[in-house]
Every structure is written in C-alpha cells, then in structure tokens.
Amino acid sequence: MDKPKPLSKQASKPKKFGVLAEYDSAAAIFKACEKVRDAGYKRWDSYTPFPVHNLDKAMGLKPSVLPFIVFACGMTGAACGLLLQWWSSTIAYPLIVAGKPLFSFQANVPVTFELGILFSAFGAVFGMLGLNKLPQLHHPLFNVARFTRVTDDRFFIAIEASDPKYDLDKTRKLLEATDAVAVEEVDD
Amino acid sequence: MASKERDPLDPVRGRKLLVEGGPSFHDITEQVCTPVEQPSLAWWLAFLPSLGALGIFGVSLFWLLWRGVGVWGLNNPVDWGWAIVDFVFWVGIGHAGTLISAVLFLFRQQWRTAVNRSAEAMTIFAVICALMFPTFHTGRPWLLYWALPLPNQMQMWPNFRSPLLWDVFAVSTYFTVSLLFWYIGLVPDLATMRDRATTKIRRVAYGIFALGWRGSTRHWQHYEKAYLLLAGLATPLVLSVHTIVSFDFAVSQLPGWHTTIFPPYFVAGAIFSGFAMVLTLLIPIRKWYGLEHIITIKHLENMAKIILLTGSLVGYAYAMEFFVAWYSGNPYESFAFVNRAFGPYAWAYWIMISCNVISPQLVWFEKIRRSPAALFVLSIFVNIGMWFERFVITVTSLSRDFLPSSWDYYTATIWDVGLLVGSFGLFFTLFCLFVRFLPMVAIAEIKSVMPAANPHPPGDH
C-alpha cells in the first residue's frame, strides 16, 4: 500500500525501529501506557523489569490464549496415556499378572493423570515461548545503551515505526508529554 | 501483639513489609547479583567438603556396580533396605519446593517470592538424588529403559498395573515439570544477569539461557499466564507424586503397609521434611549472603509454622495407624504396630517419634520460632526423624512378616552408609553450584511485591 513511500524517503538514512521513552516508576509508565493506547497506536509495547499489575489492560491487550493451548495439550496427554496402557496391556502384550484384569480404569488412573500433567506443562512452557516468539536473541532495542536497565529498575515504551499512525514528530511529542525521563529514536 | 510490632509494617496496608530496609529496585538487583558476580572465597569452604562427599558417592557406586547389590545389607525378608528409604527421603524433601512455588502462589502468599527460587532448586537436586537409588537398586541400571513403554525386539511392554511403574511416571513427570517451572522463573533473572554482565563469556552464557527476554508487557502477559497454569498443574502433581510413592507400600499386602491413610500421611510427611531442608539450607545462606532483609525472620517463622502444622499431622497419622491396627481386629496388623514400637527396631521408632512428633511442638514458643539458630537445630532433628520414619516403615514390616521362621534382623553395611552420605554430597554440590552461578532469589518476583511496584500509589485516585 503506502509502503514504498517511506522506503524511498529513508533510502539514504538507516532504517528506524521507532521511538523509545524511558520512565522511572511503575506509576509513570502505567499512565503513559493509557495515553499511548488512547492515542490509537497498535504496534507498540512497554518493557518493565517485573510484571506491573494490570499494565496489559492499560495497554488494551487482549487476554492470553495460552489456557486453551494448555487444555488441549493436557487432554491429548491424558488420552495418549490411557490409550497407551489399554493398547499395550490388552492387544500388544496381554499378560495376566496377579489375577488382575488386563485393563481397568482404577489401575490406569496414575499414568493417565501424570501424562496429562506432563503434556500440559510442555504446552504451557513451549506455548508461552511460541506466543512470545522466543528465543529471539537479537532485537533492535538491545543496541540501546539505556535499555539494559529494563531488567533492573527502569520502564520503557517503544512505539514502532511500522505503526500506521507513526509520525516521528507527533509520536515523539506524545511520549514527551508523558512523564518520560528520556525519549530517543532507535535504529532498526 | 508484641510480635507484630517487631516486624516493620507497610504504612498503607498495615501488613508486614516483605522486604525490610526500604531498598530501591536497583538495590535488590545489586544485593542478589553481586554475590554471583563477585564470589567470596568462603564459597569454597562449602563446596570442597560437598565435593568430597560426592567422591564417597562415586566410590560407593563403583563398588556397587563392580560387586552387585550384594554389597548392601539386604537379606531375605528385608529386600528393600536403605535404597528405598533414601529414595522416599529425598523425594519427600523435594516436595517443599513445589509447595512453596505452586501452592503458596495459588494462595497468593507473597512471602514465597523470597524463598521460592532456592526451594525449587532444592526440589530438583533432591529429586536427582532420589532417582539415583531406584536406578541402582535395579542392579543393572543400563537396562533402566525397560521401565519405559518403548517398542522393543522382545515385544514386551511394562506392567501398568504395578505401583512401581506408576512411580516411574510420577517421579519423572515431577522432575520434568519442576525443572520447567524453575527455568521459566529464572528467565527474567537470567536477562538481568546478561544485562549486567561485564565479560563476554558471561554475556553470551546468560544471554543464551535468557532466550532474548526483554521484559515486554506482551511477553509478561503470556508469561504470567504460563506461570499461573504451571502452578495450577504442579499443585495436584506434587500431591500425586508422594501419593503414588506411598502406593509402593500401600498397594502391597504387608501388615503395616496396607493402609488407606498412607497417601495423605506421606504427603504431610514430605512437606514436613521438605520445609525442614529449606530451613537447613536457607538459615546459613541468608547470613553468608547478607540477605537477611529479604529472607527475614518472619519468613523463617512462617516456614516454622508449616513445620508445626505438618509435624502435628504426621503425629496424628502415627496415632491413627495404631488405632486402626487395633480397631481392625486383624492380629497381623496389631502385631506389626506393637512390634514397631516395642520390637527389635524400637530404637528407630522412638528416634522417629522424638524428632518428628515432639521436637516440632517447640515451635509453639515464639522465642524458638523467631530464632534462626534454634530453627536450624530443629530442622536437623526433623531431617533425621523423617529419614527414620521411612526406615521404620520399610524395615520393621519386612523383617517381621507372616512367618516367624523367615524373620531376620536387617543391618546396613558401610556401602549403604556411603551412598547416603554420598547423596548428600551430590545434593550439596549441586546446591553450591546453583548459588555460585544463578541468582538465588527471584529478582523480578521480589520487585513485584515491593510497595513501589504498585502502579497506583496511595493518594493517586
């Protein structure tokens, strides 16, 4: 659509990732996120050293779909566990041990349960990594010196240049109008 | 209410401040990361003896593999000896880590943030120690994969009706899930270590394991959901694991083992012993690492109260076993319990009772539960008592079974002792490596429970 235009404009300049604003408290970034959300930006994110309570709501994010993934994995695991036990002890290797029936639900609960839990846990961990597109060892923000404090005591908002509403001056002004301690443009 | 005034309170909520001394976020990062980045020489004082004990483990294992399980003191009626005792002992210790990280998380007990990382590490190392014993008890550990449902040229499949096989699934699932839970909790803190790194090796090593974590709120959202779900999964898992371990005994027909109280009684005992081990580890470490304002007296007091609760539950279970043995009218059952308390292993039984039932009752006294030194001694007693509990259960029932002609007295050999001492070496070596290379307090989590983490400070509305 209007993609070629910014490309030709920036042909001589290095490509930009977006604008980064730094904050020094959880309260400041919470208010700033509400402002950026209300301004209608879509491709932006906030970065914090710990999960700030309700910040996802201040950003207007939808709830995570992870529980559905985990539920599906758990049910798959339990079904596999039950099927494995039923098939191996009645069809593949029917051997009577201590006069017990070849298949009974009671004796098969523990393994079914454990496999359900195991698959759910894999679903939770790898589902989370997949939704977050991790591992991703390179990111433009890692080139910003001040951004190393994101895992220590500073809070950041980055509005990305790919956002349709992105305009360097306007976006910069919006972030400066919040309680930011610093605002800078970041190379891609 | 004198005790409440002794702990600093949050001026707004009126509750106990979780982190004392009002540090900033940056102070917390410094206090947790600096001991990892600039290790003290004193670390070697803990590491070298642990490594020595690990050497004993290696020698004992070598001799065991060279000569076979005959080097142990097992005899004909007692064919489960220290190996199974040590296995249940170590698995039980593991339970406190999951209890702190998962159950207390679901109950929104925020004090857990100071101790969950080290307790989870303890869980993983304890389960590693536990897995050693059944592995080598098989006699031919290189055939251990026979316990797994793998298609093979013999066209044989495991017996899914055996509690021992349930154990394989329960303990291996428990180990895997604990490891995932621990690692996921570590990721943000590994990113902290990466961003603070001053050398390239450190930056790359922590960087790879941090997976490129950058604290994005879009990531935190999925991350917190994953953490909550893992806590919800680990809670029934931890209860199931010791339940299934108790099935190893309860599903058999032997008097003294064949009781329905075993699952809850084993779970209570596991939590009891696990919290004791957490105290044994954390009381010295919080002092050596100067973390007394993060792992405060109040934290120790809370854990002591859990020890009192679970210790009392265990005491109740001991009494109830006797009651049911009498009430059942079964002469074999009654004999097994009278024999436990007054038979040839009475010495072990009364060590168990004094350590597990009597000693935790001291926690009723505030002076004791707020004294790190007293709690440390108490935790050692509980560890000893819980080892003896498993010894009493396993050995007294086996050594005096239905036929008096097959009775025998069981004594451990030096190689049984070597493996138990050696497994402590393995455990402490792994724990020393953990505190040497990884942040032992969950930095991101502890920041999130500090007053400054609240996005709506008082007077904001």
Image (tube, coloured by chain):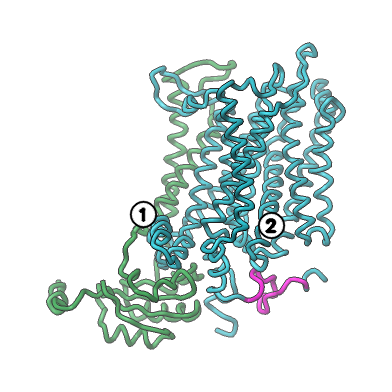
**The chain coloured cyan carries which letter?**
B
Q: Main secondary structure of the magenta part?
A: loop
Q: Nearer the viewer, mark 1 or mark 2?
A: 2
Q: Quadrant of the N terminus of chain B?
A: bottom right
Q: Nearer the viewer, residue B66 or A131?
A: B66
Specify start and end residues of the magenta stretch as a single range: B6-22
The percent position of residue B140, horizontal first and vertical second, equals 52, 23
Residue at image position (44%, 36%) is A79
Q: Nearer the viewer, residue B429 or A123?
A: B429
* Badge 1 amino acid: Gly
Residue assigned mark 1: A130
Residue occupying the far front of the picture: B41
Specify whether residue A163 is in view: no
Q: Is residue B316 above or below residue B215?
A: above
Residue assigned mark 2: B284
Colour in which the image shows chain A: green
* C-alpha span from label 1 to label 2: 40 Å
